[in-house]
Image: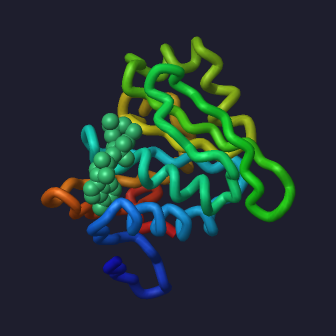
Amino acid sequence: MTIWTRPGGSLAEFYSDSPGETQALGRRIARRLGPGQVLALQGGLGAGKTCLAQGIAQGLGVREELTSPTYTIVAEYEARPGGAPLPLYHIDAYRLSGGDDFEALGGRDLLYGGGICLVEWADRIRDALPAGTISVELEICGENGRIIRVSAGGDPWP
Ligand SMILES: Nc1ncnc2c1ncn2[C@@H]1O[C@H](COP(=O)(O)OP(=O)(O)OP(=O)(O)O)[C@@H](O)[C@H]1O
Ligand SMILES: [Mg+2]
C-alpha cells in the first residue's frame, strides 16, 4: 500500500492495489474513530466501499463478517474498540431518495445516537448527515487500483 503522509502525519490520501490493502486501510482508519463519528463512504458501484467498511469493522473489534446491507438498508454490529461495546451501524443509502426518507426510517437516531456509522452512497442522504461527518472517497483506477481520500470539512483527515 502506498501512503502519502502529509506534514503532521495525516493519513489523508492512499493508493490501494488490492481488496486486502483496502481492508488494511480500514483497520488503520478504525484506530482513529470514536463514539458518534459518521463516515460517508463515496464512490461508484464496486469502488470498494463495503470492502473498506469490512476493514473498519475488523479494526473496531467486530467479530462477525460485515456484509452489504443493500436490501435491509441498515445492519448493526457490536464494536469493541477498547473493550466497552459500541454499536456500529452500516448503512446503505443506495435505495433512499433523500435525508427525509432516511429520517422517516429512524435514521436520526442512528446518526446522532453515539455509535459509529458507516454510510455507503452517503450522497443520497447528504442533507441528513452531521456537520462533523468524515468523507471517504474511493476512486477506481484500473481493475485493482483504488485512490482513497479521507477528509473532514474539506480538509485532510485526521
Ligand atoms: N484495491 C481494491 N480495493 C477494494 N476492492 C477492490 C480492489 N481491487 C479490486 N476490488 C474489487 O472491487 C469490488 C469492490 O466491491 P465492494 O462491494 O467493496 O464495492 P462497493 O463500493 O461497496 O459497491 P456497491 O456500490 O455495489 O455497494 C470487489 O469485487 C473487490 O474484489
Ligand atoms: Mg457496497
* Image location of residue 7, percent across then percent down: 42, 87
In screen coordinates, is 118 left or right of 18?
right
The one of 113 and 154 positioned closer to us in this rendering: 113
* Image location of residue 144, percent across then percent down: 22, 61
Residue located farthest toward the bottom when viewing the structure as drawn: 7
Please say if 38 is above or below 24: above
Residue located farthest toward the right when viewing the structure as drawn: 84
The one of 105 and 73 positioned closer to us in this rendering: 73
Q: Residue at x 51, y 51 (%)?
A: 54
Q: Residue at x 54, y 43 (%)?
A: 118
Q: Which residue is drawn at 13% across and 59% down?
A: 142
For residue 109, which quarter of the picture? top right
For residue 127, which quarter of the picture? top left
In screen coordinates, is 50 left or right of 132?
left
Quadrant containing the N terminus in the rendered view: bottom left
Please say if 4 is above or below 128: below
